[in-house]
Image: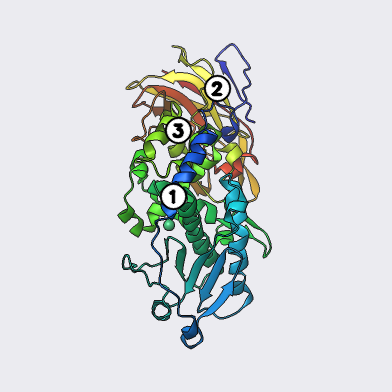
Amino acid sequence: MNRFHRFPLLLSLLLPLAAAAFALETPKSPPLSDQDRTANLDRAKEARRHWPSFGELKILYMDDLGIRALSGRYVDLYTDLPSNEKNDEIIHLLDAAVPRLCEFFHLDPRQYDDWKISAFLMTDREPFDIFGAFDFSEEEIPEFPNGFSLYDRIWVFDKNQVYYNRFLMLHELVHAFMLHTFGSLEPRWFTEGIAEFLALHRWDGQTIELGIFPDTREEVEGFGRIDRIRSFVQSGEVPSVEELLAIKPKAFDDVSSYAWCWALVTLLARHPQYADAFGALPFLAMEKDPNKPFLELLGNSAGRLAADWQNFVEWLDYGFDFDHAPDASVPGFGLEPLSDEGTSFTLDAENGCLATGVILEPGKEYRFSASGRFRVGCQGKVYPCEANGITLSYFNARPLGTLLAEIVPEKASLNELPIQTEPIGAKGTLTPKKRGELHLRLNLPTNQIKNSRGTCTVTVRP
Ligand SMILES: [Zn+2]
């Protein structure tokens, strides 16, 4: 919960407001009906009857080719990696993931009693070619650098990284599971994004948790998507939601596309505002253009998604604190223009952000001044700080704790990154490009907000 208050220059007025960012109770679009879900699953079942089949595996050659088989409940795994605990437990990991996938998509696990796929974890393609792993009459299976899935087979190249091997196997398992269940891997941004999202896992050798958000880089060795996004954010190269919805298969030659789609799916999966539209997406796979009904289900929240997306990727980091995430869909309270004599606001460091409820006009210069000493969390410690921030540590290329002003426009479309952010510090000016609500924010990673204390008084004059 965030609590904040503001007061005009002379008259002090306390207005606490609950605004925990990713826990908003918002009106939801009507969810997909049971009937629609079942109809889509039936269409997928019918499509499966026409699937082409692969050639037989040449089991007799296996020993000579240096390939060994590990048979599980849902997966037969063939690998040329040596037998050891880490390599051999992958079969248990994949088996453990299937019931979790059923839970995630609200599917009856009994439907998967007879489901079995073949998985190939390879250091080298050649022996697997001879083995018949790629023996498919319909088409040549292309060269690929990491992993590939087709109908009921998945292939992954060994990356010599325990976590990343498991991640890639899970990514391809999700594709195989979804193609079987939903009949198609469309729309592409969603199926790649959700394979990435679900493949991020915690595994203790017995139980598996899918769809985790990593606390540290070390926890998800080889993943690297967060670092990639952070460097794009710093160079100002962030795609709009619209660009991602239209992403072409060819774009996935670049691993950055996986990173962006993972981030978009993570936002949609975690944010209650988008829960219904997101939950319907897999069941729309066989529609001609699944993005269309998805956007219809999003309804009015589509406009806010542009701002939420920009906020999410700009503040993304390891250990992202969803309870303290910036949220553009907080409407403030009774938006009003800034009074001629100016207004002061109190920004609580513990909240990190204040939606002021004040509308600023485009093209007009506003003058800011800030005072007060507060404390900010940084690398497990707490440091005294003022509005200019502390240079001990930087976030988004600015000193930690710097006062920022943001203009969140009243309306945005999915082809925009609508929020204008300017560093203010102890003194500064801002000329809005668009009419919008003024948000004040301290430059802190989300996971340091809860450790910060004290207040900063910010006066804004037209
Ligand atoms: Zn994929």
The residue sitting at 43% across, 38% down in the picture is 310
Name the N-terminal-most of marks 2 and 1: 1
Of residues 403 and 62, the one nearer the viewer is: 62
The residue carrying mark 3 has its beta carbon less than 8 Å from ligand 1: no
The total of numbered circles placed on residues is: 3
Quarter of the rendering containing residue 115: bottom right
Which mark is on residue 46? 1
Residue 406 x %, y %: 44, 30
Quarter of the rendering containing residue 271: top right
The amino acid type of the residue labelled 2 equals: Phe
Mark 3–mark 2 Cα distance, whole angstroms, equals: 14 Å
Q: Is residue 102 above or below residue 32?
A: below
User: Which residue in the protein does label 2 denote?
Assistant: 345
The quadrant where ligand 1 appears is: bottom left
Give the crowd class for mark 3: few <14, some 14-19, many >=20 residues within 10 Å.
many
As helix, strand or loop, the secondary structure at mark 2 comes to strand
The residue sitting at 33% across, 42% down in the picture is 243
Mark 2 vs mark 1, foreground winner is 1
The amino acid type of the residue labelled 3 equals: Ile
Name the N-terminal-most of marks 1 and 3: 1
Name the N-terminal-most of marks 3 and 2: 2
The residue carrying mark 1 has its beta carbon less than 8 Å from ligand 1: no
Which mark is on residue 305? none
Q: CB atoms at circles 2 and 1 under 8 Å apart? A: no
Q: Is residue 159 above or below residue 267?
A: below
Residue 100 x %, y %: 61, 52
Q: CB atoms at circles 1 and 3 under 8 Å apart? A: no
Q: CB atoms at circles 3 and 2 under 8 Å apart? A: no
Mark 1 vs mark 3, foreground winner is 1
* Residue 423 appearing in the image: no
User: Which residue in the protein does label 3 denote?
Assistant: 424
As helix, strand or loop, the secondary structure at mark 1 comes to helix
